[in-house]
Amino acid sequence: MTEQLIEKIETMEKKHEKQKHQREKEYPKSSVTLKIYRANRRAGESPHYDRIEVPVQHWTTVLDALLYAKAYKDQSIGIRYSCRMASCGSCGMKINGIPRLACYTKVSELQGREITVEPLSNFPHIRDLVTDFSQFFAHHHNVEPYIQNDNADMQEKNKLTEFIQTPEDVDKYLQFSYCIKCGLCYSACPTVATDTQFPGPQALSQAYRYFIDSRDTAPKERLNLVDNRHGIWRCHFAGSCSSVCPKGVDPALGIQLLRGHLLGYSKNEKKAAELKERQKKDD
Amino acid sequence: MRQLRGNTSMEREEVADRNNREGMMGWLNPRRYGWERVSYWLQRLTGVGLLAYFIAHIYETSQITGGPALWEAFLELTQTTLGHIILIVVIGMCVFHSANGIRLIFAHGGKGLGKPGRPDYPYDAVSLNYRQKSGIWIALILALVAMLYGASVLFGGE
């Protein structure tokens, strides 16, 4: 009995030792080299990469590593960030070629001892890792990302109107409202890469978010906004937007569902409800 | 120390002009974003390939207007090893484009993608589900099988 127990303990110890060894193998990085894209054409500086070695821990994010480099190695690195917890969407950049949030990407989950950080593609470049979001926000603005309701009285504050929704109604748009406008989907989209007038996955998924909201009474106008040559038909469901989204918004799903309404695949529930109400009144 | 020049309007314009778009290069690297991107890339590539074949086919059949001898001579080109390989590739392109196209007809209308809900960590996208991935794999397998059959007919036999 005792022998068995000792044997068991020894096996467990061996197992722990093996696991420890494996962990060390998995996280051997006590330091990594950041290969940072640097360019500032306004100052006459042509694009090049700077290599900076930074110390890292298991929990170090790429943003932590970049901020370390900025604090102790080169203060001139241009980087945009704010919340450090994947809520503001400011620190989007290409990490090892894929658009990601720097604050949401741990160094330990990346392969190799060198990490390449570049500005997001498909956004006009400003300096180093900073890009211009004005075109992206303009597309977002163009799909009228707000509830339009003829019954809501916005003039008289005392006469506030309440619009009741069931949890099922909320589920239809909730995930799309989690968008933090980080621009990763816009950067990954192959259509945006070639067509400047294409609204992009973010704007189109927001069009669906308001289209399907039961409080919104302008579905037809919303469909008209995206139903054009450079609009929703340019999406070919490459799915890259959804694979890079850090918040689970799944823009590709929103776009296809919206297109389903345009193609007549999906029934328009608002129209059906409207017809039902009209029928009730007639009766 | 960096030297910053003044913010003249001309310089600002120059900055705004830099679009930083990936362009066609964005299409050429399908490995970064998973199977759906590979399928997008193959669908485009096979589409362009089939269009090229269609044009070549029209040209080939138009040769009959020059008489049977010219037609026969042109047809001989498809009986060479290179002609056979091209035909096998065309078979593969045709089958993949059709099978994947059927998947896309439904997916583009939101069918087979799942329903929106409340996303939880690790935030896997509903639309990139196994039904879609299986559709891509089936299209690839069908294309491969058709190509193998085409090869056995063209190179085997006689």
Image (cartoon, coloured by chain):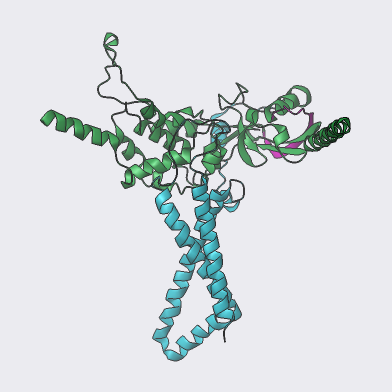
Chain colours: A green, B cyan
Front-most of residues B83 and A250: A250
Q: Quadrant of the C terminus of chain A?
A: top left
Front-most of residues A10 and B6: A10
Give how far across and how far down residue A38 sits, in percent: 69, 35
Residue furthest out toward the front: A1
Give how far across and how far down residue B122 sits, in percent: 58, 33
Q: In screen coordinates, is B14 left or right of B106? A: right
Q: In screen coordinates, is B29 left or right of A65? A: left
Residue furthest out toward the top: A158
Front-most of residues B2 and B24: B24
Q: In screen coordinates, is A27 left or right of A227? A: right
Q: Is residue A115 visible?
A: yes
Give the residues in magenta.
Answer: A44-61
Q: Is residue A230 visible?
A: no
Total numbered badges shown on the rendered structure: 0
- Depicted B63 relative to depicted A146: above or below: below
Q: Quadrant of residue A150?
A: top left
Examine the structure image and report whether residue A54 is included in the region drawn in magenta. Answer: yes
Q: Characterize the magenta stretch by its predominant secondary structure.
A: strand
Q: In screen coordinates, is B27 left or right of A1? A: left
Give how far across and how far down residue B36 sits, in percent: 53, 49
Give how far across and how far down residue B1 sits, in percent: 75, 26
Front-most of residues A185 and B130: B130
Q: Residue at x 43, y 28 (%)?
A: A174
- Depicted A183 relative to depicted B70: above or below: above
Q: Quadrant of residue B6?
A: top right
Residue furthest out toward the bottom: B69
Examine the structure image and report whether residue A192 is included in the region drawn in magenta. Answer: no
